[in-house]
Image (tube, coloured by chain):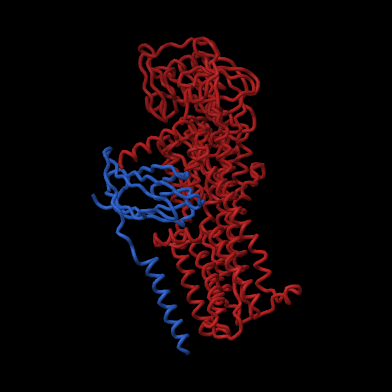
Amino acid sequence: MTSAHTAATDRIGHRHHVSPTASAEAASPAGDRQAEYGTLMRKWWFGAAVGVPTMILSYPWLIPGLRDLFPRESPQLWWLWVAMGVASLAVLVYSGEQFFAGAWEALRHRSANMHTLIAIGTGTAWIYSTVALLLPQLFPSEAMTDVYYDVTVVVTALVVLGMAMEVKARGRTSEAIEKLIGLAPKTARVIRDEAELEIPVEEVVVGDIVAVRPGSKVPVDGVVTIGASAVDESMITGESMPVAKSPGDEVIGATINKTGAFRFRATKIGSDTALATIVRMVGDAQASKVPIQRIVDVVSGYFTPAVLILSVLGFVIWYDFGPAPAFAYATIVAVTTLIIACPCALGMATPMALTTGVGLAATNGILIRSGDALQAAKKIDTIVLDKTGTITLGRPAVTDIVPAGGFEPDDVLALAAAAERDSEHPLAAAIVDGATERAITLAAPAGFEAVPGQGIRAWLGERRVLVGKQDFLEAAGVNAAGLEGEAARLADEGKTPVFVALDDRAAGVIAIADPVKSDSVASIAALRKLGLQVVMITGDNRRTADAIGRSVGIRRVLAEVLPQDKAHEVRKLQLEGRTVAMVGDGINDAPALAQADVGFAIGTGTDVAIEASDITLISGSLRGVVSAIAISRATMRNVYQNLFGAFVYNALGLPVALGVLYPVIGLLLSPILAALAMSFSSVTVISNANRLKRFKLAEVAA
Amino acid sequence: MTPDQIFVTVGGLAIVGFVAWFFWLKRTPGVKASVVSDGYQEQMVLVKGGYTPDTIRVAAGRPVRLLFRREETAACSEQVVLADYGKSAPLPTGTVVPIEFMPGDPGEHEFTCQMGMLRGRIIVEAA
């Protein structure tokens, strides 16, 4: 037995690893759903075909032409009703089969669900009618008792129709993920033995050189080696503008090459590609639970048995205190109560909205990890933006060089660039690039030591070079006071002054600025319009930080924060009683992202599975943060609407079905109306969830 | 009260009592997952109108593999969710779908369909 299991497991595991397209095969939920829909529709048509004549012939005395053919108490009416009894039994057996099978299966598991309620309801109506027909002497009234075969048939038909519409609508909620799966390219043109060869995408291996022609899809993830082009990445990142690609740039599988031709080296294939990871993450998130669902689960665990109890109590009360014929009234009340209760609307309220919301986000390049992240994103009131790479491009450049007495600007840059040559600090790259642009040859440092958040210490031969903050230089015994004024001026312009010292002498200040991304200002304004307090966090000095804060419209700026202290700053904001979202790059900012109530990793490119983040934005634009928050809010609003609707429906429907309005205004619900209401309520919940798809992102981004 | 009313009332209350006991009070001891050669605790779960078995006992500290096999087309059960373990999987009809997780500390965890209509329990026992 065990080996059979293992074999089966291997088979599944294999199928899942092949490619995301595998799940689009016939055995997929989508295929199942189509078959289920077809079956339900056939059952509905059969129920409806029997239902219409049954409805009419149940009350022939109300219809002029039939009144004389089938008068009350007549033997031909009795025979007509016997025929209806047989026809309705056929409907129960064919159209209503899943209710009885489902009820029986649930009963074996000591649980009760919608099937239980409908099966008992329709079954009771049929048995009551049949007993009334065959053994009328059991009934107190001498008149021939009316039958309720119409209830049996019409309720079955309506609920089946409701289920069919539900299956259809469920399919629509998962359209987004199916669209993503459909993006996967089928073939790739790889270079093997100097020849271009078209092969199925599954056969591409890491390291293959892949050729991409204008207008064709990039088959897998990789890095451009030759050529240049513009690539439409909107299907993955949500960015509508094509992105320029040149050697060294990353390309994402399933994006579309626009103009030029290029070749790239495959780095991620099969289930490792960004697209496959996205599909997997979206699927997991859609199947996860919004925290509020746990409460709903507890309620729905008690709901169905509670309805059974209510129905029995309703029967007893109507039998004891109701008007004559008490048995008929009591039966109808009990049946109506069973049928109107809709545990489905309750159960579907959250998952349907979650599926739609997460799918909508994914098509905009936003990956929401789970229902928890979604609910948390709705609650945030403060958003912390890491400056570098989030608000700014994260590619700083040298803008000014102010030498101290006795130094030339190029000397200062040469010293700094030599010292920073092997550093991985982003400012180091700017200095080195600046030196390269000015055609300065870099000396190789003999020794090199980085002090995180402070600066670096390097030895050029016997001479010590310090590059970093003023404090760092002064701590090492260098007097940099003469440069303080210049540094302050540069900092006021939002530039980062970097002090350079040779041995014990200050050599000069290099100003580095990181340009603000083109859409940061608009996005920050949009975040504030959503009612969030926007906070910027940066390792820059206070003046630089404030200058950038001013230019992008952020009032609260946390400056001079060392990388390892970012998480602590987030914690401090949380201690102020705020619910904090943190936006950062997902690698350097991982601890802060994890500390925040919601962590947004931004601009991840193909590294979509950033562990520390709750929400991953594939593109680098802050607009994605705005969209993500707007989608979370809209989704949670939808969840609450659905839950409210489902609760109110049941809270109003059940008492009315039990007949509480009967003593007051004489209102008693017919079981057929109850079936209509029940089907309608579950379809409403799903339609409301589908409404989310029409949510316009443009409105919030403006 | 007439005799038939007394009969209906007493009978009705008895049914109410039975429903409450049947659905809420009685619990099954469950099935203990067996340890297989690769060290996993493994249990096959049939998905048809519910989960069979619906109560699975596992020992703490040893990975668990549940093999779900769905044998119906009703849309209700097309997804199984282990919310506490952050795991879920679509269940295509007629295919065995494995879900693996570490059971964690002794306690009880639910697995459900996406709508929470079908329920099963995982009871983690001290090893």
Which residue: 67% across, 70% down? A57
Answer yes or no: is residue A540 visible.
Answer: no
What percent of the width, then of the height, locates residue A608?
49, 34
Task: Tell me the quarter of the image containing the N terminus of chain A.
Answer: top left
What percent of the width, then of the height, locates residue A123?
52, 68
Answer yes or no: is residue A497 visible.
Answer: yes
What percent of the width, then of the height, locates residue A438?
55, 13
Q: Chain coloured blue: which letter?
A: B
Front in this rendered view, residue A48 or A523:
A48
Front in this rendered view, residue A62 or A589:
A62
Which residue: 57% across, 83% down? A325
Q: Is residue B27 above or below residue A429?
A: below
Which residue: 53% across, 55% down? A348
Colour of chain A, in one word, is: red
Toward the bottom, the furthest residue is B1
Task: Tell me the quarter of the image containing the C terminus of chain A.
Answer: top right
Residue A517 found in image quarter: top right
Front in this rendered view, residue B89 or A375:
B89
- Lateral position of residue A569 relative to residue A623, left or right: left
Q: Is residue A75 above or below residue A353?
A: below
What percent of the width, then of the height, locates residue A152?
58, 67
Residue A500 found in image quarter: top left
How many numbered discs, if any? 0
Which residue: 57% across, 38% down? A549
Toward the right, the furthest residue is A64
Q: Is residue A394 above or below residue A103?
A: above
Q: Is residue B5 above or below residue A312?
A: below
- Lateral position of residue B103 relative to residue A298, left or right: left
Residue A64 found in image quarter: bottom right
